[in-house]
Image: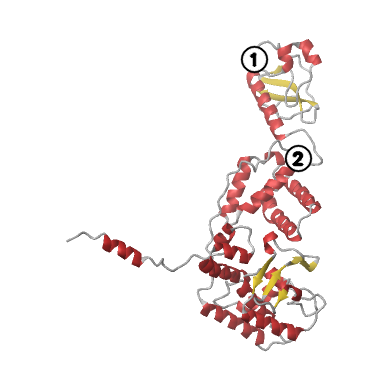
């Protein structure tokens, strides 16, 4: 039987009995027993992560180093390594032991171990998330991330192969493809934290990954009120054109007006109830108190909380929206769920239904790039330019101004009005004749 010519890390198989070579000149072997003597070795336990006396065998030109190391579970296991020389075999064995204890190799932990595929770890992380009190939307985002990003990028890796450098490269590739890395980084951090808790990893490889700054996207909004008027005309034309089937409702027109007047999210607008609206107040307002959730295979329902704590907020509504809501209320009558935008059968309207109508109305026009979110950016930009980013943040329901300024406020195309100030400076600094 011919032993391998290179490292045999983490090998626990039996080996033909060979006479050990003399252990003199063992160098700096760290074994506590080798420093204390053979009798002491029998009485002292090898510490976790440590190893015992190294013995050597030689067969032909191949040297083999053998010892026992104590794994994290406290069990002593034999480990071996080979090399072209005695010193080479020793160095390889010591390096293998260090790597073994850094990655937690050799120890099974509730089904997660260094040799567990990351695809399995990801599934276990999702199961753990399902046991926590997470919102349905968050769970859906996590599942989508595992399916679309984590498994395609690293699903076939072993947990023990997930080094900081490897994860760093994955996140940079993700960034280079035009995606935001911050959410994926947080998800990977949680997933590998699960592996650490199960002793499958000594440390979280995401901890020391470099922070990858997301390239600031260009915030695109409608250029002026004339374009807004054109879009509103497109929607009205689409809703009133002759088509087979039930008569078209005003839902898309009214929803569009509400979104471009408040900057609310589409799910927040469709979750509005009449009890959330006060049209008789001196300053009429509505309260955002929930959002619409769609789950494949389950259906559509109203979640009693918004996207975040800041999502629950009052929004003042202008007179044109007050008029629209009064007309809807009179035309609609009572519905059992008190919805402002109920479906034809009296249930919560899925946002996918409104997306489909919007796409049908704008397809093939110069406004096919506009989405419901465009109006949210339009409102954020308008408010920020007149009243500042903080007011825009509060209106849009963001947790911080950075999000508002980065993703919802378009850069101004108007030059700063400073020519008068600069002209005065030039005149005052002119040399005397």
Label 2 secondary element: helix
* Residue 420 picture quarter: bottom left
Mark 1 surroundings: few (<14), some (14-19) or many (≥20) residues within 10 A: few
- The residue that mark 2 highlights is 197
The correct choice, above or below, for 203 with respect to 191 in the image is above
Mark 1 vs mark 2, foreground winner is 2
The correct choice, above or below, for 48 with respect to 253 in the image is above
- Image coordinates for residue 341, horizontal then vertical, percent: 73, 77
* Residue 50 picture quarter: top right
**Which residue is pictured at 76% across the width and 56% down the height?**
134
- The residue that mark 1 highlights is 27
Q: Nearer the viewer, residue 132 or 70?
A: 132
* Residue 110 picture quarter: top right
Say if mark 1 contacts mark 2, CB within 8 Å. Answer: no
Q: Nearer the viewer, residue 310 or 145?
A: 310
- Image coordinates for residue 140, horizontal then vertical, percent: 74, 59
Mark 1 or mark 2, which has the lower sequence index? Answer: 1
Q: Is residue 340 left or right of residue 262?
A: right
**Which residue is pictured at 79% across the width and 17% down the height?**
44
Report the quarter where the C terminus lies: bottom left
């Amino acid at each position: 039987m011919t032993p391998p010519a290179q490292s045999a890390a983490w090998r626990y198989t039996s080996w033909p009995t060979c006479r050990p070579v003399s252990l003199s000149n063992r160098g700096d072997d760290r074994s506590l027993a080798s420093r204390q003597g053979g009798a002491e070795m029998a009485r002292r336990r090898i510490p976790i992560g440590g190893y015992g006396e190294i013995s050597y065998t030689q067969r032909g030109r191949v040297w083999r180093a053998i010892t026992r190391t104590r794994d994290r579970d406290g069990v002593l296991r034999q480990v071996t390594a080979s090399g072209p020389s005695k010193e080479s075999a020793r160095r390889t064995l010591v390096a293998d032991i260090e790597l073994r204890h850094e990655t937690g190799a050799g120890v099974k932990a509730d089904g997660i171990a260094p040799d567990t595929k990351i695809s399995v770890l990801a599934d276990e992380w999702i199961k753990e998330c399902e046991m926590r009190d997470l919102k349905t939307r968050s769970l859906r985002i996590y599942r989508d991330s595992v399916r679309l990003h984590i498994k395609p990028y690293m699903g076939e890796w072993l947990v023990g192969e997930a080094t900081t450098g490897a994860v760093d490269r994955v996140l940079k590739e993700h960034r280079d493809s035009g995606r935001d890395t911050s959410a994926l980084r947080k998800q990977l951090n949680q997933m590998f934290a699960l592996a650490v808790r199960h002793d499958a990893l000594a440390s979280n490889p995401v901890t020391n990954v470099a922070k990858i700054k997301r390239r600031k996207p260009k915030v695109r909004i409608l250029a002026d009120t004339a374009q807004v008027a054109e879009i509103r005309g497109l929607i009205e034309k689409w809703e009133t054109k002759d088509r087979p089937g039930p008569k078209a409702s005003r839902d898309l027109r009214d929803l569009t007006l509400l979104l471009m007047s408040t900057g609310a999210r589409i799910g927040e607008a469709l979750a509005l109830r009449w009890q959330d609206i006060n049209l008789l107040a001196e300053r009429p307002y509505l309260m955002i108190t929930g959002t619409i959730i769609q789950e494949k295979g389950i259906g559509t329902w109203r979640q009693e909380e918004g996207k975040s704590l800041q999502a629950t907020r009052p929004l003042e509504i202008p007179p044109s929206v007050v008029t629209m809501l009064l007309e809807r209320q009179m035309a609609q009558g009572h519905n059992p769920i008190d919805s402002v935008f109920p479906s034809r059968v009296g249930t919560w309207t899925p946002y996918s239904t409104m997306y489909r109508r919007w796409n049908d109305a704008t397809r093939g026009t110069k406004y096919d790039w506009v989405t419901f979110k465009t109006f949210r950016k339009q409102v954020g930009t308008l408010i920020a330019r007149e009243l500042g980013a903080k007011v825009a943040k509060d209106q849009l329901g963001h947790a911080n101004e950075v999000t508002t300024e980065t993703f919802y406020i378009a850069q101004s195309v108007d030059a700063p009005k400073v020519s008068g100030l600069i002209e005065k400076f030039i005149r005052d600094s002119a040399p005397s004749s």
